[in-house]
Amino acid sequence: MTPDLAKCFEPTTLNGLTLKNRFIKAGTFEGMTANGIPSDALSRFHQTIAEGGSAMTTIGYCATEADGRLNENMLYMHEGIRESLTSMIDDLHQLGTKVSGQMGHGGGFSKNRDLRRKRPLGPNFGLNSLGIPQGMFFCDGMSIADIKHFTQQYHDAAKFMKSVGFDALEIHFGHGYGLCQFISPKTNKRKDQYGGSLENRMRLPLEVLAAVRSAVGDSFPIIGKISLTEGVRGGLHYDDAIKIGVMLDKAGIDGIVTSGGTSTMNPMIMFRGGNILQPMLKAESSMLMKAMLTLVGPRLFKDYPYHELYFLEHAKRLRDAVSCNMIYVGGASTNKSFELLMKEGFDFIQLGRTLLSDPALPLKAQKDSGYKSSCIHCNECVATIEHPSGIHCPRFFPAA
Ligand SMILES: Cc1cc2nc3c(=O)[nH]c(=O)nc-3n(C[C@H](O)[C@H](O)[C@H](O)COP(=O)(O)O)c2cc1C
Ligand code: SF4
């Protein structure tokens, strides 16, 4: 094993948190949280990841408040789940794995009917593309009071998450969700101090980062997931990502996860490989949704063929511009790639699909220096995102 590959399996720290190796399970909204309550199945899912040797697992998409859920069955942070979260995290700690919580808010992109308001809130009035089949066609714009509330929810959720035992928090700044809607010039058309220049569009995300920091303190790891590009005309592009990363770095973030795309407008950039349109059509039970997918699917789900380390080139540009930890995500599936990432100076590697197809990847890769994941990047797992029993890899675990 070369020194760079060996480094993948050695312990290191992230703002004082010791991680036993460089592998972190990427946030993959697991489901298994009917009515926003974590289930035993969710615990088992993460225990399997823990047993497979990852240093840290990420509980995907923890909405900061009930209104931040994309649908009613997403986890949201509230006292009612204190006991179940604490017990789930304790069990994962017993298995030697740290636990990160991905803090999310859908903003104006939601099909959650259980809202305080008539419509979900984004930066401004606009189309709510996720809610259309539910008859929730539009979102409203946040007032300044709504923005303050939004930020406060991040603060309160972070405090709660630390208190139930999470070891790290990952703020979602990408993929077209609430904070990304503010950052992107495509979706943020505000005329006040929260819209216009990049500095203004970053105001809310930076206020949120400050609120989360004040809730958890200086010696608690906070990482952020960004989109290196949204891949749409008029949206965020690679050059913007460098500026965004630098702003987050200067504001004291401990690490940046370099993803890409938007769930709303161009999702295939984030998980390159097989087009998800056909698996989505197969999984969809609503005739209306099927019709809509048939109509808009070919434009929404563009073809991005898989190749290893598909974000590497642009992630390296950001690596050169920041001093915080760099956490690579996107098509890392062989020991050769893991080794290259260490050589290129990345600090951690997040794994999504390869851990769904084989949760024991870290243990196997440590034993076999020629390790290659068996994941074929068909993306059938993406279409299981609303499956009643949660996400799974239909290729290798068809009975799940
Ligand atoms: C089934 C599935 C669900 C996902 N859900 C989320 C999510 O909730 N939050 C997120 O930031 N990314 C999500 N992703 C994207 C992954 O975190 C990751 O960025 C992407 O899969 C690319 O990494 P990979 O090549 O290692 O799979 C999801 C991916 C998959 C396959
Ligand atoms: S379904 Fe399985 S093999 Fe296909 S991309 Fe997902 S994890 Fe990989």
Image (cartoon, rainbow, N blue to C red):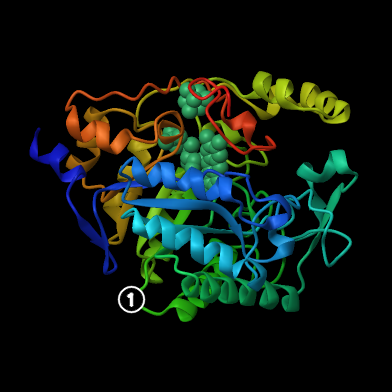
Q: Which residue is mark 1?
A: 219
Q: Residues within 10 Å of mark 1 (few under 14, many from 20)?
A: few
Kind of residue indicated by mark 1: Ser
> Could you tell me which residue is drawn at 35 percent across and 64 percent down?
254
The quadrant in which residue 350 appears is top left
Q: Residue 158: give x, y in percent of width and height.
A: 53, 72
Horizontal side of residue 210 vs 191, given as left or right: left
State the quadrant of the C terminus.
Answer: top right
Q: Residue at x 89, y 61 (%)?
A: 118
Residues 54 and 38: in front is: 38
As rendered, which of 239 and 342 lies closer to the eye? Answer: 342
Q: Position of residue 105 (x, y in %)?
A: 64, 59
Task: Residue 32: give x, y in percent of width and height.
Answer: 63, 46
SS at circle 1? loop
Q: Is residue 170 visible?
A: no
Inspect this view and state whether residue 378 appears. yes
Q: Is residue 203 left or right of residue 244?
A: right
Height in image: 94 above or below 127?
below
What residue is drawn where x is 61% and y is 37%?
Answer: 232
| Closer to us: 288 or 263 | 288
- Determine the image quadrant of residue 165: bottom left
x and y percentages locating residue 265 in the rendered image: 66, 38
Using the image, determine if residue 176 lies above or below residue 215.
above
**Horizontal side of residue 45 vs 36, given as left or right:** left
Q: Quadrant of the N terminus?
A: top left
Left or right of 1 in this view: 34: right
